[in-house]
Amino acid sequence: MTLDPEFWSLVLLQGITLAVLLIGWAGLLVPVFPGLAVMWLATLLYALIQSAAGRMGWIDWTLFALISLLMISGSLVDNLIIARQMRGRRIPWRSILMAYLAGLLGSIFFTPLVGIAASPLALYAAESARLRDRKLGFESARAYMVAWGWAFIAVFSIGGLMIVLWALWAFL
């Protein structure tokens, strides 16, 4: 067993970074938790520490740049998938914003599970009132849930790819 402090500091840094990446990735299950941003901040801190230690080459910076692009695109994809699906059903922005706000407030003041349930319920209520038809309100809420599922799959996959790129950067 080696007693080299540089080796153990690198092991500690990689262990903490990986733990934060996994927490951020798991956090993607919670709609209002900025999991991709948390993951990106972990890799940014890793890059800054590695750079200060003189261990960042062009391949390392390239992988960090790819992780950064994934974080940006993942943040956009999430909202675009949901908004596009809902706008494709001619759901007005007012109802969409009401659903987002209900989810955010439910997650902040109660639990993330309440937030997950509050968004489609608020959309159902808003659309049922607007259209004066509960069946159409339910169809709008159903479209939201399908879009949310697809957005989750996309963002969760992007988060997984961010972890893979960091692992290549850190361990190869």
Image: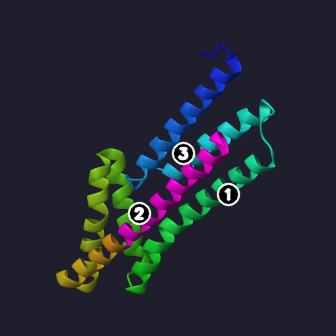
- Start-end of magenta stretch: 147-172
Q: Residue 38: which disc?
A: 3
> Which residue bears the numbered disc 2?
152
To which quarter of the image does residue 172 belong?
A: top right
Q: Position of residue 67 (x, y in %)?
A: 64, 54
Q: Amino acid at mark 2?
A: Phe
Mark 1 vs mark 3: give the one in front.
1
Which of the marked residues, 1 or 3, is nearer the chain's N terminus? 3
> In which quadrant is the N terminus drawn?
top right
Mark 2 vs mark 1: give the one in front.
1
Q: With 104 as the anchor, is 42 left or right in this view?
A: right
> Which residue bears the numbered disc 1?
66
Q: Is residue 62 magenta?
A: no
Which of the marked residues, 2 or 1, is nearer the chain's N terminus? 1
Q: Amino acid at mark 3?
A: Val
Count of number-bearing discs: 3
Q: Position of residue 121 (x, y in %)?
A: 25, 66
Q: Residues within 10 Å of mark 2 (few under 14, many from 20)?
A: many
> Circle 2 — which element?
helix
